[in-house]
Image: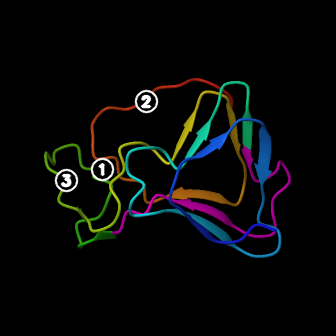
Amino acid sequence: MLRDITVSSKIEIVGNITLVANNKDITITRADTLTGVPVISVASGATLNLGTETAMENMLTIDGGAVWNGNEGYPNTDAAQTTDRSNNTGVRGNFAIIRTDGTFNMYENVILQNNHNNTSIYDNHSGGG
């Protein structure tokens, strides 16, 4: 049975896996020390399914660990605003929460939240999902 966890080292998906939250809400959180790699990496030829095609009973949340505060709001959606006045007192990762070279499917009742990259360099990968 899946349970809440804090991930302190990258999870590498090399086969086919499906994560579901059927008995209770589940949160997978990036640890404060996990900043140089994504939380989950899907290898070429592998498949990660978050949830199922038919809705899960509960919520599955992948949390990047950023903690946004201040009343400025995030993200900055004002095209005229040239600076980001929000403040993250949590994790600033070098990579997104999930990186995929394989197939990634995300279904209903799954949330990716609180990711804050501390660089302006983005990995661009194509694949499933």
Separation of residues labelled 3 and 1 (CA atoms): 10 Å
In this rendering, position of residue 72 left or right of residue 112: left
Which three-letter amino acid code belongs to the residue tagged 3? Asp
Of callouts 2 and 1, the N-terminal one: 1
Near mark 2 (Cα within 10 A), the count class, few <14, some 14-19 or many ≥20, is few
Near mark 3 (Cα within 10 A), the count class, few <14, some 14-19 or many ≥20, is few
Q: Nearer the viewer, mark 2 or mark 3?
A: 2
**Picture coordinates of residue 124, whole percent (x, y):** 46, 26
Extreme residue in the left direction = 82
Separation of residues labelled 2 and 3 (CA atoms): 22 Å
Q: Which residues are magenta?
A: 49-67
- Residue 99 vertical position relative to residue 39 in the rendered view, above or below: above
Q: Residue at x 38, y 51 (%)?
A: 35
Res. 103 image quadrant? top right
- Which SS does the magenta portion mostly show? loop
Which three-letter amino acid code belongs to the residue tagged 2? Asp
Q: Nearer the viewer, mark 3 or mark 1?
A: 3
Near mark 1 (Cα within 10 A), the count class, few <14, some 14-19 or many ≥20, is few
Q: Residue at x 35, y 61 (%)?
A: 91
Q: Quadrant of the N terminus?
A: bottom right
Magenta stretch holds residue 13: no
- Residue 29 vertical position relative to residue 102 in the rendered view, above or below: below
Residue on which disc 2 sits: 123
Of callouts 2 and 3, the N-terminal one: 3
Residue on which disc 1 sits: 77
* Closest to the observer, 57 or 79: 57
Indicate which disc residue 50 carries: none
Q: Quadrant of the C terminus?
A: top right
Residue on which disc 3 sits: 84
User: Which secondary structure, mark 2?
Assistant: loop
